[in-house]
Amino acid sequence: MKTIALVEDNPDNMLLLRVLLKGHFVLHEYENGPEAARGIVERPPDLVLMDISLPEMDGVEVMKHIRTHKTLDSLPIVALTAHAMVGDREKYLAEGFDFYIPKPILDEDQLLGPISRFLD
């Protein structure tokens, strides 16, 4: 079974992700940037769903930290964020994220479709 790292500080959003993904994937959950940066390097998943607004270290910083590790430079990292203003998608893709999913997630296919493309 493939592994997904969920990096999300909002308990309600984490619960939704857990409900949508549990049973399909092994989940590693992280609530803040430093914890995610350490945990993902120590236990590399097959894919990362990364919130942008995180305590202590934002999602962009975490993604850049992960990318400094040669064995993780091709790890798919998806920005999963409420930053959904015009231009945000392009901004986060230019930062180095592999895909961008705006929150709130209104349809499970909005989440599962991109995950399937990266993990199949």
Image (spheres, rainbow, N blue to C red):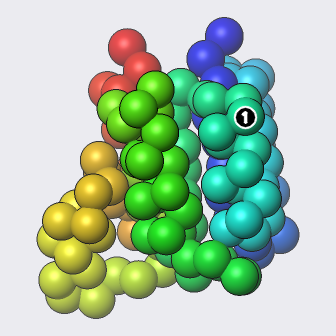
Q: Nearer the viewer, residue 27 or 43?
A: 43
- The mark total stands at 1
Instruction: Give above or below for 63 relative to 116.
Output: below
Q: Residues within 10 Å of mark 1 (few under 14, many from 20)?
A: few
Give the residue drawn at x 43%, y 47%: 68
Q: Is residue 20 visible?
A: no
| Residue name at image x 72 percent, y 65 percent | 34
Q: Quadrant of the C terminus?
A: top left
Classify residue 115 by image quadrant.
Answer: top left
Residue 14 horizontal/vertical position (percent)? 75, 59
Image quarter for residue 3? Answer: top right
Which quadrant holds residue 55? Answer: bottom right
The answer to whether residue 88 shows anywhere in this view is yes
For the point 73% across and 34% down, the residue is 42
Give how far across and how far down residue 36 sits, in percent. Answer: 70, 55
Q: Is residue 75 left or right of residue 46?
A: left
23 with respect to 105 (left or right): right
Residue 89 placement, left or right of 56: left
Where's the N terminus, which quadrant? Answer: top right
Q: Residue furthest bottom?
A: 85
Q: Amino acid at mark 1?
A: Glu
* Residue 31 picture location, percent across and down: 79, 64
Q: Secondary structure at mark 1?
A: helix
Which residue carries the number 1 mark? 42
Residue 104 placement (x, y as % from top left): 52, 71
Report the residue at 47% width, 39% height from top: 69
User: In the picture shown, does residue 13 fall above or below 66?
Assistant: below
Q: Residue 2, relative to residue 92: is it above or below?
A: above
| Residue closest to the eye, 16 or 33 | 33
* Image position of 95 with respect to 29: above or below: below
